[in-house]
Image (tube, rainbow, N blue to C red):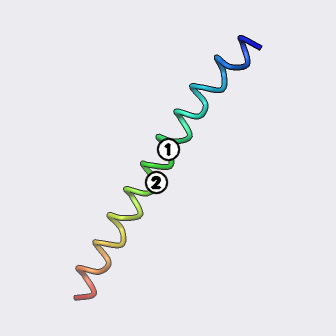
Amino acid sequence: MKVNTRIRIPVRYVVENTIERIERRLHRLTHSTLSTAK
């Protein structure tokens, strides 16, 4: 059980980080496309 909890925490942290990075990239892409469209 101890090993399982140790593995779960970093995995969740990495997943959240990757999601944040993807969202930021998407926001940048949308902003760039909107600026070019204008």
- The residue indicated by pointer 2 is 22
Image height check: is 2 above or below 11?
Answer: above
Judged left or right of residue 33, residue 20 is right
Q: What residue type is labelled 1?
A: Thr
* Mark 2–mark 1 CB contact (< 8 Å): yes
Tell me which amino acid carries mark 2. Answer: Ile
Nearer to the camera, 20 or 2: 2
Marks 2 and 1, how far apart at CA: 6 Å
Does residue 31 lie above or below 8 as drawn? below
Image side of residue 33 versus residue 12, left or right: left
Q: Residues within 10 Å of mark 1 (few under 14, many from 20)?
A: few
The image quadrant of residue 7 is top right
Tag on residue 27? none
Q: Is mark 1 on a helix, strand or loop?
A: helix
Numbered mark located on residue 18 in the image: 1
- Residue ID at (25%, 82%): 36
Residue 8 vs residue 30: left or right? right
Which corner quadrant holds the N terminus?
top right
Where residue 11 appears, as percent x and y from the top left, is 61, 30
x 32%, y 64%: residue: 28
Determine whether the residue tagged by mark 2 lies in a helix, strand or loop. helix
